[in-house]
Amino acid sequence: MSEENEALFSKKNIKLLTDPLNDNNPITVQVLGICSALAITVQLKPAIVMAIAVVFVLVFSNLIVSLLRNLIPNRIRIIVQLVIVASLVIIVDQVLKAYAFDVSKQLSVFVGLIITNCIIMGRLEAFALGNKPWAAILDGFGNSAGYAVILIIVAFFRELLGSGKLMGYEVLGHKAKTVAESTGLYAWGYENNGFMLLSPMALIVVGVVIWIQRSKNRKLIEA
Amino acid sequence: MNTNSNAYTFIFAIILVTVVAGLLAFTATSLKPLQDENVRNEKMQSILSTIGVDESRENAGNVYKDYIKGEFALKSDGSIDENPEVEAFKINLKNEIKKDADQQRYPIYIAEVKGKTTYIVPLQGTGLWDAIWGYLAVDADENTITGAVFDHAAETPGLGAEIRETWFEEQFIGEQFLKTTGDFSANSFVSVKTVKGGSKADDKHGVDAISGGTITSDKLSIMVEERLERYLPYFEKN
């Protein structure tokens, strides 16, 4: 087989990595994994942890399924994929509970819900079952990074506009009970937008991201 | 090899689940001590914060003994269970409240801050979606509440989940659960209730309920009343 000699970062492989970041982004183009984008983007920190967890789960499940792709009986392949994803997610959950207790409390059920994240099952079915391990790793990393980028963008705007903080730091100044005691922007009478904390605003921010992306990237616009 | 035969499918499935089960069991048991430590420290942190001691979770374990001078498991008649196997701190209220009232053990923590005694009563109940719990600090007069901490497993964010916010918890400070201090009879016990539409300023037994979180607020009132009532015999004896 000639593919054996293919360079690790050939043009084709690079495309696996970069495509999901823009042209084929799982959230903004395929509109998958919206549920978690909505739920855990109120603050930046849990969003970053969630993004790392999804990168871990997707890269490893893609790798494992790709390694086993010639061994998995076709009739039970969905169940096998689910078992692999579920065990990886449980491991992530256990590790978070031991080493990042506060974050794990914040993410609560959403860690478990990575199992049902449509991006993961989608990539396993569409890619890992039919491709070699290295390509599957790249594909998994590319797609989860595409997911992570959108998650972090949304969380950035929601935390900044909703609570005036980033990663918990008061970047816009301190809001005291009265305007006179406040510092930074709040001293000018600025108010946080409580709307940004509610789930629908996540969808609206995703919508704005999609709008900007399509106005820059003309080939995404359907005729 | 025919990967579609029944025998192969069965064997594959059996091997897969055995490997996965072993792997998960190993992860879970090896991380358990760290996880338990976190849960323990968090409990200490919550108990300390009712008496106004704000410590980080990591540090809570270290200073806990400086403030908490006694931990007792009470019987339903208010006497202390002297059985050394019953450790108040280790009582899991979630399981305990399922038992009959006279079978339960009621943990109480006694704190001393600057020479002042405070009783800390743990709470456990059900909210709208799942469990709610918390701690109430009761002043040495055995009537006035000096601090409250609540938490929840799955109440609605922004609505019922507000019970764990400072503005809600602070309302309990200064409230009283008895009509007359020192009178622990059923007539005197009124508990502290959440009042829909806001409690009156001179109401010593009510706090503002959460708008949009009525059911969680009501369930919280029920929890506070049910739990506090169990400690009346103890307060009466001391």
Image: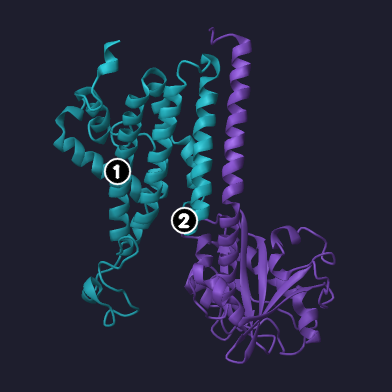
Q: Which chain is cyan?
A: A
Residue B97 at least partly seen = no
Tag on residue A100?
A: 2
Amino acid on which the number 1 mark rests in the picture: Ile
Q: Quadrant of residue A12?
A: top left
What residue is drawn where x is 31% and y is 49%?
Answer: A152
Judge whether residue A215 can be spotted in this image: yes
The answer to whether A52 appears left or right of A217 in the picture is: right
Say which label, 1 or 2, has the lower sequence index. Answer: 2
Instruction: Describe residue A101's horizontal placement relative to residue A162 as left or right.
Output: right
Where residue A116 appears, as percent x and y from the top left, is 48, 35
Displayed quadrant of residue A130: top left
Q: Which quarter of the figure has residue A187?
A: bottom left
Q: Which chain: purple?
A: B
Decide: few, some or many residues near mark 1? Use Cα within 10 Å; few <14, some 14-19, many ≥20: many
The label number, if any, that marks residue A150 in the structure image: 1
In the rendered image, residue A26, in percent from the top left (x then y), is placed at 32, 34
Where the N terminus of chain A falls, by quadrant? top left
**Could you say which disc has been placed on residue A17 in the image?**
none
Front residue of B209 and A38: A38
Residue B95 is situated, as x and y percent measured from the top left of the image, at: 73, 57
- The single residue placed furthest to the bottom in the displayed view is B115
Say which residue appears at 47% left-offset and 21% top-offset.
A68
Do circles 1 and 2 both sit on a common chain?
yes
